[in-house]
Image (cartoon, rainbow, N blue to C red):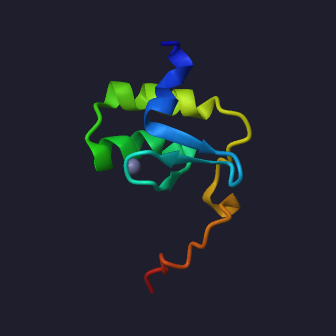
Amino acid sequence: MAEESFGCQYFEHLAEYAVAVCKECRHGVLPSYIESHLQRIHRIKQKQARQVANSVGEWPSLIEYASELAVPSRAISPVR
Ligand SMILES: [Zn+2]
């Protein structure tokens, strides 16, 4: 297997929304959150989580910031 397939083991490239979708829990995860997502939610070791994050980070045209996400974010309401 080539190195760039690390990301494909855990994530699916949803080109329509420009996000990576976790194959385990079907959540869209931003590239900057992939490492912590894998570690916290799926108990993946940090070294491997980073390799996956690096791999997914190289996928073309993924959005980087939550503000660009096209999915509704109203489920999370600010604490006031
Ligand atoms: Zn997940």
Q: Is residue 78 left or right of residue 46?
A: right
Which of the 4 image quadrants contains residue 17?
A: bottom right
Above or below for 36 versus 78: above
Q: Which residue is located at x 45 percent, y 86 percent? A: 80
Residue 40 position within the rendered picture, expressed as x and y whole percent measured from the top left = 30, 48
Residue 29: % across, % down:
51, 51
Residue positioned 37% across, 47% down in the render? 24
At 49% from the left and 79% from the top, the residue drawn is 78
Q: Residue 58 vs residue 51: left or right? A: right
Residue 58 placement: quadrant: top right
Residue under the point 43% across and 81% down: 79
Q: Position of residue 75 (x, y in %)?
A: 49, 78
Q: Nearer the viewer, residue 11 or 77?
A: 11
- Total count of labels: 0
Residue closer to the observer: 45 or 28: 28
Of all residues shown, which one is farthest toward the bottom?
80
- Residue 37 vertical position relative to residue 77 in the rendered view, above or below: above
Q: Position of residue 52 (x, y in %)?
A: 46, 30
